[in-house]
Image (tube, grey):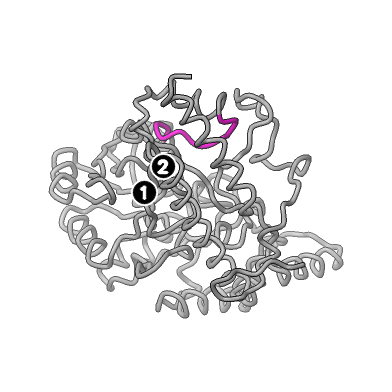
Amino acid sequence: MNRKTPEDGRDFCRFDTVIDRRNSDSIKYAPSGRSGKPDNLLPLWVADMDFRVPDPVIEALHTRAEHGIFGYGDADDRYFQALSSWFDTHFGFPVDRRWVVQTPGVVFALSAAIRAFTEKGDSVLLNRPVYYPFSNLIDGLGRRLINSPLTFDGSRYHIDFEDLEEKIVRNDVRLYLLCSPHNPVGRVWTREELKRIGDICLRHGVLVVSDEIHCDFVWSSHPHTVFASLGEEYSRNCIVCTAPSKTFNLAGLCASNIIIPDRDLRKAFRKCVSDTGVSGVNVMALAACRAAYEEGLPWLEELRKYLLANIDFIDRYLRENASQIRLIRPEGTYLLWLDMRDLGLSGEDLERLVTEKAGLWLDGGTMFGPEGTGFQRINIACPRSVLEEALQRLCSAAADISSGR
């Protein structure tokens, strides 16, 4: 019998189904030993979902596979129309196809932007705790990492605008990596906050590179604002990194749409991409992305309800079973930030608690910067039964620590 939620009677059977992803070439379910983790951990770490993609996407992939020829690919008018329509419908921002540069992924695009618009030794700004490839790219490419840490008021994170501008001026920052919505703290920056960022960066000649891959997952009254939609002067000073991969669980197909309204920025970025040897687009990704944007909305609407119910579930569960673990209620994303500082453990001891005692594979907060010490990131895009098992393990391990066992 299909399970229905009591809230609205919708059928959520598809999201309750536990799918065995082992032996499917999944990074998430790869043998734990490859990463130095113990075996048999329950993985709720990397940001992909344990749900099958929308049926129209699978059908589009079947149709494309049956064609039987997989030569070099390029996006057609229909692809760009689907992309533009999606952003127009959901964010009031129709995308001109001339603005789009396709890359294998958003992290690749962030790397290309850093290489295209800065030199070795130049300063690049971010806000920790933040998605760890930001830091890795800055360091790995020989740039100078400048951190304007987010401030935390106990329930919500904020940008310290005075510190942001002071760091920009003092360090002659050339480029700012913005995470919007923010991973891992779950903030959805308001239009006013984004304009304030934009004004500071315009004043000081800082290019904004905005990672907006989680834009389709925002909760309650927290609408996402595309940075380039703030106005013409802002659009001329930004690169907006998007992809359907998080939205429709397509990360393994490796396709992103990088939106660059300014012609000169776009030309420089495109040259940097070309200089890496990347050319052409994954033809299967084109078929999947087009189908997702054209026909995936009903699936996504169901998914959002399911994920929001998962967020409510974990919030209630922790309040009732583990007062030392607190959920930072997200405004966006399906990656939740857990405050475990009340357990009083060092970073290493907290990792041991999660892996050895609870048998879980989460993302430790310190990988997002030292400001993440005492926190853990958990991916709740999984069936409710899996999430419940994870919480039972985590709360049991926390109870043992509290009782001295």
180 on left or right of 196: right
Q: Amino acid at mark 1?
A: Ile
Q: Are marks 1 and 2 in contact (CB under 8 Å)?
A: yes
Q: Is residue 385 magenta?
A: no
The amino acid beneath tag 2 is Leu
Which element type, helix, strand or loop, lies under badge 2?
strand
* Disc sitting over residue 328 in the figure: 1
Q: Which label's residue is closer to the chain start, 1 or 2?
A: 1
Residue 248 in the image: x percent, y percent? 61, 62
Instruction: Answer few, some or many: residues within 10 Å of disc 1's Cα (few below 14, many 20 plus, some between 14 and 19).
Output: some
Q: Nearer the viewer, residue 137 or 189?
A: 189
Q: Dot 2 surroundings within 10 Å: few (below 14), some, or many (20 or more)?
A: many
The spot of residue 395 in percent (x, y) is 50, 36
- Magenta range: 358-367
Residue in view at x 67 percent, y 57 percent: 51
Tell me residue 223's x, y (percent): 37, 69
Within the image, what quadrant is residue 350 found in? top left
Q: Secondary structure at mark 1?
A: strand
Q: Position of residue 225 (x, y in %)?
A: 35, 68
Please tell me the numbered disc located at residue 384: none
Q: Left or right: 284 with respect to 109?
A: right
Residue ID at (79%, 67%) = 64
Image quadrant occupied by the N terminus: bottom right
Whether residue 9 is situated above or below residue 185 in the rendered picture = below
* Residue situated in front as seen by the camera: 111 or 377: 377
Say which mark, if any, is on residue 338: 2
Q: Distance from label 1 to label 2 (Cα)?
A: 6 Å
Residue depicted at 31% across the width and 60% down the height: 189
